Structure formats: C-alpha cells, structure tokens
Image (tube, helix red, strand yellow):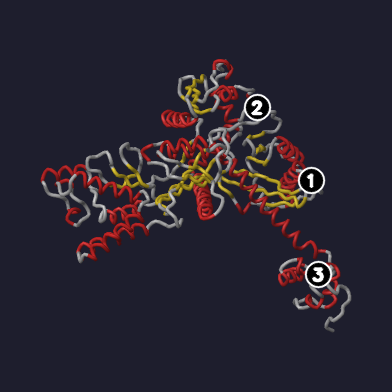
C-alpha cells in the first residue's frame, strides 16, 4: 500500500481542460478510470486529507501508485475515451456488472456478401446488426421462422452455404419458400440486399409501414384480377401480423425509446431495460450493478448508459432514452448519443402518461431483478461460507460467527419506540427466533433504547438458565451481536452486555451512511471491501432488522391512532371497541354517531352507548333521549 502523497502531481502540472485519467498500482495495472470536466479540480480532490475521503475513494488512492491523464476537447470525447479505457483495462475500482443471463439476439451479418440471419447469445462482432435482447430464445426463433416467409434471407451456416454453392443445389428451405437461395443464383445480389434491408427495417420498428404497403399491393393485385399474387401478399400480411402480435403494444404512437428503470440499495443497483420500437416492446434485459465507485444515483445511471450504448456492435441508440432517475447534467449524454445515432437523441425522465406508467413497470422489474440476485447470492452455500470466514478474519473473531443476532430501534419523535431482534444462522434468516421489544423507558433515545433491549435480551437468557433446566430458545448465545448504528450505539450495547454479565460476546455496529463497521473502544471504524461477501452479509442482517422494526413500529402507531380514543371509556373492552370500529369504519365516523346509532352494534347497550357518545362528543351524548328501554 502506497502513500498518496508520494505520487501526487503538482497542481500546476494538471491542466484545467476536460479529460480522462487513470490510477495505476505498483505493477502498472490500471485500478480506476474516470473523467472530469476540469482535470485539475477533480484530481486534486483525490489527494485531500484521507480522513475526509469516502472509504471507497480512500481505498483506491492507497492501492494506486501513480496517476496519468489525457486531455480531450469536449466532455463527449471524454465519455467515449473513458468507456474504451474501462472496457480495455476492466479496473477493479470501477463499477462491476452482474448479469446472470446470456440474452439471445437476432443477428444479421451485414458484412457478408450474402448476409445471414441467426440467433446468437452475444452481441460483439463488428459488421453485424443486432436486434434484441429478447427474454427467450424460442420466442425469437419462432419469430424468425415467420419472418423468413416474408423476407427470405438465408439462415444456414457458411459451410452449408458453400456446399450448396459447389453442388449447385439449394437446401430444403429454398423449396419451402423460406430462403431466396442466393447460393445458386436464384436472386441477384442487389435484390437480395434489398430483402435484407427490408428485414432490418421491420425489426427496427417499421412493421406498420410494411403492413400498410402489403395491404396496398394486395388490393392492387386484386383489382387487376391477379388473385394468385393477391393470395401470396395476403399470406405475407398474415405472417407480419403474427410477428407483430408477439410484441406487447405499450404506446399508441410509433415511439422509439429505451426505458431504463433502476432500484438500488447501499451495495448494488438493479437495472431493467425495455427496448421499445414502433410503440412495441421488442426486447428487454435486466442486470445488477455492483457499487464500487463513489457515485450518486445519477452517476450510476450514467455508467449504465455507457454500458448499453458504448459498444457499437449492439446497435444505435433510439430517439429517446427514458431513465427513472434524472441525470445531473444530461447535455453531454444527449450529444454523445446523438453522435452515435447520427440524429437527435434525448435523455429524460417521463413525468406523466403511458411512458411514466411503463417506467413504473421497469422500476418494479429492476427491484425484482435485484431481489432475485440477492436471493441467489444468499442461498449459495459456498458464498455464505466465504462471508462467515471473511467476517472472522476482518473482525478478528475466534471462529466464524455461525449465529448472528442484530438489533434495530425504530421510533418517531420519541413515541411508540420499539426494537426488533433478528437471527441469522449459517448466513440465513431464522425467523422463528425473531423477537420484538416495546421500549419501557419513557422518552428513551436510540442509545438508551439499545441498552434496554440488549439488557433485557441477555438477562432473559441468564434468568432462564437459572430458573429451569429446560433451555429457552435464547439459551443458545450468538457468536456475534450486530447493532444498527455507529460508535454510540455500540458503546451502549457493550455497556449493557457487561451489566448483564456477558463479557465474551463480540459486538459491532454497522453505520448506514458509509457502511462502516464500528467496534467497541475503537476510535476508527473497520472499512470492509465494498465487494466483500462479509459486508454483504452484514448489510442483509441489518436491513432485515430494520425492515422488521419499521413494520412493528407502523403497526403500533396505527393501533394507537385508531384505538387510543376508546381505551379510557369505562365498560368498553377490546372486543366491543373492535366491533364499533368495524361497524363505523373509523374513529371519526364513530365520534359523529348518536347513541341510537351506537346501539345497533351487537353488545352495545343504552348505558354504554351513552358513555361512548359522551366520551367521543357524539350527538345526544349523555342525554339518553330516545334510547330503547
């Protein structure tokens, strides 16, 4: 590990123009690539006091041993160069992408003398146009089988094409009108190229234009009594209609757009992309971005745009790029994408209408992609074992923490303060051991509440051990106690453990803002690598405790809001209060009810109705007038 001061360039040597920079380690390997509107301002920020740096940035500058840069004329050039360097060097401190699927594309080999249509699993070859990606390979194969009846391009491999050319006899596809047989010269090269261009145009979103064209040609053939040609065009029209029906219609107009929705947590971002062409979803994909850089949501969305459109082989960007989170500065991205397309491209966030609705669907799918990735990762035994071993190493534990308990406090302005305790065994939640606590100390803040919960939890264990030979479900102590918070919460938990006579239980805190791990009596936190399985497990444990505490707090707050007005009415027990609320629907409607209306509820007599009306201020309260005898 090197000292950043040893390779810090003099500020006067750094230009103030836009550019791209690379940090390298002692072996010369690139560890991080970035761009800047002002190189001097941006690079100088990396060499500030290390204490003030973000943990990820601090790790990077200490891992590096040198920095170099290249000036460019515009930010658009910086975007292109940054992407090419990231692609070339794959730096370990830049964003990582996790894509568990290999999506199928429909590829047209435009660089061949006689282009071929094929379903492929990657989009990398230059001189080939790609359409997709699609969710299922069988769907695009079925669609291609329909389309070659209208656009008879070859689908055979080059070896089959060359053999047919040598023997002068086409394959079966030519005899069933699914290939124009360029191998034996049945079609001129120029005409075959027109067929290929028409197929690309149809796949690119011009399907409705072809349908209108075939309808006109069919009617013209019919009017001149050429019924055979009209029937052939009718069959083509039906094939195109079936192909279009396979794609969901999302917009009434001929919108060409990519809809990009994101959902994120502290360590990862789920991404869902819908490729809309001609108002129809022609392709989709989802993947996960590992957060390895010090970026906000806008910065990570920019990284997604780089990945989607930086590779020329994938295809041109559409006229609109719709993102769920707006970019801080969309100008350079509009210019970059417009240069790639050759015409205007706009990056924006939809605010209303059908596009906003589809964006909500994309965001929901991004959340599901993130959830599924998290579930797969957490259910893998090898990954869980690695996480527990890393926790043992990073926290200097005597053994891997097979049982972890985590406590989180939830409150709102000091009211209805509650706590949750969740249990993970072998890296998986053990929900039957979850506990919840209602804080008894009036006006307790986070640290006081934390101390109370830790004391109650471990005093219960000690009392259970002393009172009975039959162990309670909490007689089995955890190997690690995690609290949601920083140094104050950790100290409160440690003090409560010592007061309960527990001196051998490691306790740590996970601070949410920077994901720092705090230990008792330590001035500085432990910074775990952002991509480590140990940090990922701690985050899962903390988030599960937080979710459980929030749910409990909302439940208590809602119960207090609906039932507190009825709690102090003499003679009104929980069952009758529940019956009243069920009948009237709310405390407000119940307060406006007359004693006569209250008596309609089973179990509510005249005297109790009068007491309820008097307590809630209803009409006729306390008079008893008109009550049945």
Compared across the picture, whether 497 is left or right of 540 comes to: right
> SS of the residue at dot 1?
loop
Percent from the top left, x then y, of residue 628? 83, 83
Percent from the top left, x then y, of residue 554? 69, 55
Query: Which residue lies at the image location 40% right of the left edge and 38% below the top edge?
Result: 342
Residues at discs 3 and 2 in contact (Cβ within 8 Å): no
For marks 1 and 3, the one nearer the N-term is: 1
Placement of 52 over or under 356, stated as above or below: above
Q: Which mark is residue 572?
A: 3
Percent from the top left, x then y, of residue 117? 28, 47
Please tell me which residue lies in front, 415 or 285.
285
Can you identify the residue that label 1 sits on? 444
Q: Which mark is residue 52?
A: 2
Question: How many neighbours does mark 2 have within 10 angstroms: few (below 14), some (14-19), or many (20 or more)?
Answer: few
Query: Which residue lies at the image location 61% right of the left edge and 48% below the top edge?
Result: 544
Percent from the top left, x then y, of residue 295? 56, 35
Compared across the picture, whether 160 is left or right of 1 comes to: left
For marks 3 and 2, the one nearer the N-term is: 2
Placement of 539 over or under 255, stated as above or below: above
> SS of the residue at dot 2?
helix
Please tell me which residue lies in front, 150 or 378.
150
> SS of the residue at dot 3?
loop
Residue 510 seen in the current view: no
Q: Looking at the image, is mark 3 or mark 2 nearer the viewer?
A: 2
Residues at discs 1 and 3 in contact (Cβ within 8 Å): no
Among the 4 quarters of the image, the one containing residue 507: top right
Quadrant of the drawing holding the N terminus: top right
Among the 4 quarters of the image, the one containing residue 567: bottom right
């Amino acid at each position: 590990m090197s000292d950043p001061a040893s390779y810090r360039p003099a500020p006067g040597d750094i230009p103030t123009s836009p550019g791209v920079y690379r940090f390298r380690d002692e072996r010369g390997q690139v560890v991080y690539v970035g761009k800047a509107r002002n190189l001097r301002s941006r690079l100088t920020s990396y060499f500030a006091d290390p204490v003030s740096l973000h943990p990820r940035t601090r790790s990077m500058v200490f891992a590096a041993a040198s920095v170099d840069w290249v000036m460019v004329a515009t930010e658009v050039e910086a975007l292109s160069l940054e992407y090419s360097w990231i692609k070339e060097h794959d730096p370990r401190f830049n964003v990582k992408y996790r894509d568990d699927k290999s999506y199928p594309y429909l590829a047209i080999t435009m660089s061949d003398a006689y282009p071929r249509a094929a379903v492929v699993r990657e989009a990398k070859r230059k001189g080939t146009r790609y359409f997709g990606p699609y969710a299922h390979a069988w769907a695009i194969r079925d669609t291609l089988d329909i389309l070659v009846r209208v656009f008879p391009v070859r689908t055979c491999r080059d070896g089959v094409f060359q053999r047919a050319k040598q023997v002068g006899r086409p394959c079966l596809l030519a005899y069933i009108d699914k290939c124009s047989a360029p191998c034996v010269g049945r079609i001129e090269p120029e005409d075959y190229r027109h067929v290929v261009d028409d197929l690309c145009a149809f796949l690119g979103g011009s399907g409705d234009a072809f349908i209108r064209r075939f309808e006109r040609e069919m009617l013209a053939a019919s009017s001149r009594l050429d019924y055979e040609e009209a029937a052939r065009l009718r069959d083509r029209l039906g094939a195109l209609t079936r192909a279009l029906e396979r794609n969901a219609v999302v917009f009434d107009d001929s919108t060409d757009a990519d809809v990009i929705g994101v959902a994120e947590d502290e360590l990862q971002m789920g991404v869902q992309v819908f490729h809309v062409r001609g108002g129809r979803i022609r392709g989709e994909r989802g993947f996960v971005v590992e957060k390895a850089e010090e970026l906000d949501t806008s910065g990570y969305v920019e990284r997604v745009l780089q990945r989607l459109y930086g590779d020329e082989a994938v295809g041109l960007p559409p006229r609109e790029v719709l993102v769920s989170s707006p970019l801080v500065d969309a100008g350079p991205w509009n210019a970059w994408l417009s240069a790639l397309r050759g015409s205007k491209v706009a990056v924006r966030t939809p605010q209303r209408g059908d596009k906003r609705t589809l964006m909500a669907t994309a965001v929901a799918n991004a959340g599901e992609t993130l959830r599924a990735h998290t579930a797969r990762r957490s259910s893998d035994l090898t990954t869980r074992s690695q996480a527990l071993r890393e926790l043992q190493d990073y926290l200097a534990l005597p053994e891997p923490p097979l049982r972890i308990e985590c406590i989180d406090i939830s409150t709102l302005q000091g009211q209805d303060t509650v706590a949750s305790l969740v249990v993970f065994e072998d890296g998986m939640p053990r929900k039957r051991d979850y506990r919840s606590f209602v804080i008894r100390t009036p006006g307790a803040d986070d640290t006081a509440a934390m101390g109370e919960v830790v004391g109650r939890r471990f005093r219960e264990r000690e009392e259970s051990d002393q009172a009975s030979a039959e162990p309670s479900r909490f007689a089995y102590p955890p190997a690690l106690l995690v609290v949601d918070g920083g140094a104050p919460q950790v100290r409160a938990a440690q003090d409560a453990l010592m007061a309960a006579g527990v001196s051998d239980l490691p306790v740590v805190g996970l601070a949410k803002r920077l994901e720092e791990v705090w230990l008792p009596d330590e001035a500085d936190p432990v910074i775990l690598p952002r991509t480590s399985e140990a940090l990922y497990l701690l985050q899962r444990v903390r988030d599960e405790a937080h979710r459980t505490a929030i749910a409990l707090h909302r439940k208590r707050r809602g119960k207090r809001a609906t039932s507190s007005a009825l709690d102090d009415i003499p003679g009104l027990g929980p069952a009758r209060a529940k019956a009243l609320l069920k009948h009237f629907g709310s405390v407000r409607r119940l307060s406006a009810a007359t004693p006569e209306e209250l008596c309609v509820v089973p179990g509510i007599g005249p005297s109790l109705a009068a007491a309820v009306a008097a307590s809630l201020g209803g009409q006729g309260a306390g008079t008893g007038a008109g009550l049945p005898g």
